Image: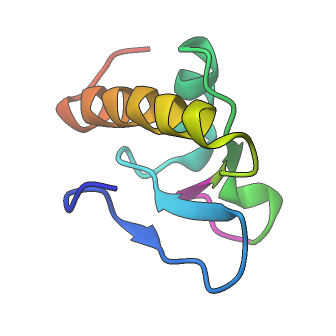
Amino acid sequence: MQNNVKFIRPEAAFFVYVLAPNSSGIQFAKKCYEAGIAVLPGALFSQRDDFVRLSLAGEKEKNISAVKAFIKVYEQARVGWTD
């Protein structure tokens, strides 16, 4: 991932926890879903709602395409959006 995307590097998993750019994992997961990207809010796995979980369990080419799409949504969220 690009240097401006904050994430927790996995040690042995096939998923990555990414810091939500707008501080709400639930809100950011909804924006990803609207863009056709399935991520899970971190609040499903802990008390924190500032991360989303991005799975990399699929085929390599599909993962690359999904990560590129994810970065576009992430960058749009960093600039800001209105609900």
Q: Is residue 59 above or below residue 73?
A: below
Instruction: Check the picture and name the quadrant holding the N terminus.
Output: bottom left
Q: What coloring was used for the rendering? A: rainbow
Task: Residue 56: give x, y in percent of width and height.
Answer: 66, 51
Q: Is residue 42 above or below residue 30?
A: below
Left-right relation of 41 to 83: right
Q: Nearer the viewer, residue 68 or 72?
A: 68
Left-right relation of 54 to 83: right
The reply to whether residue 44 is visible in this rendering is yes
Q: Nearer the viewer, residue 75 or 21?
A: 75
Q: Nearer the viewer, residue 32 or 10?
A: 10
Quarter of the image where one finds residue 27: top right
Q: Nearer the viewer, residue 56 or 54?
A: 56
Left-right relation of 61 to 69: right
Task: Residue 64: give x, y in percent of width and height.
Answer: 49, 38
Q: Residue at x 44, y 51 (%)?
A: 20
The reply to whether residue 50 is visible in this rendering is no
Q: Residue at x 61, y 58 (%)?
A: 49
Q: Residue furthest bottom?
A: 11
The residue segment tinted magenta is 47-53
Is residue 50 in the magenta section?
yes
